């Protein structure tokens, strides 16, 4: 079996040694090099031709974002970011995902050695996923947009009068931060409510929601337990908590709860989609975006059985075609389509049904 070849880029000798140790303990991967800064890394990548690199953000001579931007324009390859769990670290990590990083690991601010060892399984899982990911060359314009101001937004016609019973449910994992951004920014201000579970650790979802809120026409925020679910709003599951929807009289409300991981995830798409099937039924529209694994696939089938209309992202436009493939295999999706077509399809579906509430039979 060919091992996944990894180059570690980090200015900390301790972190480089720990990551190399974690990687080399795996039977299917090997650390072929470790660089203290991007300029050394550039030569290493050219000479060693790795399959994946892990990349720190804050480094001397050139920071990780500048290096990543150049790398994804000139020699695109799978990158797993290693970021510090701080508010600034979260913002910069999100820019890295915009630039094409496959995923990220949040290293602890204190107790780095013990913390990284505890994250060993997570780190190596992300490297395995990155090795299989579809990585695309970053256009120069996209690079500038990701590190500068947001591009101008095209006009989108309002949907008009819709039933407040309708809710769009989105599940995503690896590659999903950017896929969800593309989908949300195509929705009009009077879109039905959107509820989103994106696999993301604590400390990052607040920054992620704020970033989307500055780009989308609808209001985007972390979900709060007990808040009313309203049209024109998107609610993101907070990292480390499950999100679901419940009824309270004539209204939908969001439930944000702690609990055991489901399908190894917290938040879990399964939890959100099961509540959609149970509570919203034929008034739900389900979307399964790029991601590794099968989280949410069975629950999406439950949604379809309850009368929802579901879409899965196609393989060609996914970073990782895991979760959509599993949903398709279970017969959960009515349509399979490229990411760029999903928002227009949702809008067309709502318009074709006049957005009317559907009564259960």
Image (spheres, rainbow, N blue to C red):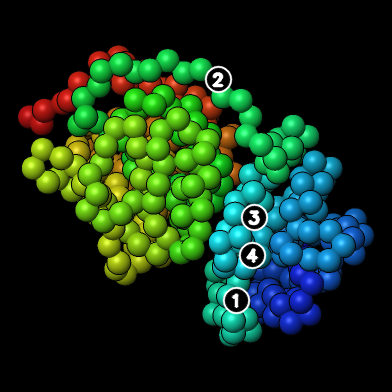
In this picture, residue 288 sits left or right of residue 147: left
In the rendered structure, are the residues bearing label 3 and label 4 in contact, judged by CB atoms less than 8 Å apart? yes
Of circles 2 and 4, which is in front? 2
In the rendered structure, are the residues bearing label 1 and label 2 in contact, judged by CB atoms less than 8 Å apart? no
Give the mark nearer the N terminus: 2 vs 3: 3
The image quarter in which residue 149 lies: top right
Badge 4: residue crowd in 10 Å (few <14, some 14–19, many ≥20): many
Give the mark nearer the N terminus: 2 vs 4: 4
Q: How many marks?
A: 4
Give the alpha-carbon distance from disc 1 to disc 2, as whole Å: 41 Å
Of circles 1 and 4, which is in front? 1
Give the alpha-carbon distance from disc 3 to disc 4, as whole Å: 8 Å
Give the alpha-carbon distance from disc 2 to disc 4, as whole Å: 33 Å
In the rendered structure, are the residues bearing label 2 and label 3 in contact, judged by CB atoms less than 8 Å apart? no
Circle 1 sits on which residue? 109
Q: Nearer the viewer, residue 353 or 61?
A: 61
**Residue 83, numbered circle:** 4
Badge 1: residue crowd in 10 Å (few <14, some 14–19, many ≥20): few
Circle 2 sits on which residue? 154
In the rendered structure, are the residues bearing label 1 and label 4 in contact, judged by CB atoms less than 8 Å apart? no
Circle 3 sits on which residue? 92
**Residue 133, numbered circle:** none
**For the point 19% across and 42% down, which residue is it?**
252
Give the mark nearer the N terminus: 1 vs 4: 4
């Amino acid at each position: 079996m060919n091992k996944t070849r990894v180059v570690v880029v980090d200015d900390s000798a301790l972190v480089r040694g720990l990551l190399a140790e974690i990687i080399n303990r795996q039977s299917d991967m090997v650390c072929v090099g470790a660089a203290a800064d991007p300029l050394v890394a550039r030569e290493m990548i050219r000479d060693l031709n790795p399959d994946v690199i892990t990349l720190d953000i804050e480094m001397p001579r050139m920071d990780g974002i500048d290096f990543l931007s150049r790398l994804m324009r000139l020699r695109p390859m799978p990158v797993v970011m290693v970021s510090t769990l701080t508010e600034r670290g979260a913002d910069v990590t999100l820019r890295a995902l915009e630039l094409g990083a496959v995923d990220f690991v949040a290293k602890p601010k204190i107790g780095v050695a013990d913390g990284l060892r505890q994250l060993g399984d997570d780190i190596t899982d992300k490297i395995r996923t990155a090795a299989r990911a579809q990585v695309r060359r970053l256009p120069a314009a996209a690079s500038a947009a990701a590190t500068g101001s947001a591009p101008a937004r095209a006009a989108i016609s309002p949907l008009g009068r819709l039933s407040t019973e309708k809710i769009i449910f989105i599940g995503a994992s690896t590659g999903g931060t950017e896929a969800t951004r593309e989908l949300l920014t195509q929705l009009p201000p009077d879109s039905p409510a959107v509820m989103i579970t994106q696999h993301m650790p604590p400390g990052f979802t607040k920054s992620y929601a704020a970033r989307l809120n500055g780009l989308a026409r609808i209001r985007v925020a972390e979900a709060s337990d007990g808040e009313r679910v309203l049209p024109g709003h998107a609610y993101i599951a907070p990292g480390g908590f499950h999100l679901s929807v419940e009824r309270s009289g004539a209204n939908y409300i969001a439930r944000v709860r702690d609990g055991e991981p489901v399908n190894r995830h917290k938040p879990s798409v399964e939890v959100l989609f099961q509540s959609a099937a149970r509570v919203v039924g034929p008034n739900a529209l389900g979307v399964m975006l790029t991601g590794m694994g099968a989280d949410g696939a069975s629950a999406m089938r439950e949604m379809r059985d309850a009368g929802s209309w579901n879409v899965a992202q196609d393989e060609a436009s996914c970073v990782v075609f895991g979760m959509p493939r599993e949903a398709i295999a279970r017969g959960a999706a009515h349509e399979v389509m490229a990411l760029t077509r999903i928002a227009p399809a949702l809008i067309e579906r709502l318009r074709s049904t006049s957005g009317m509430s559907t009564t259960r039979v």
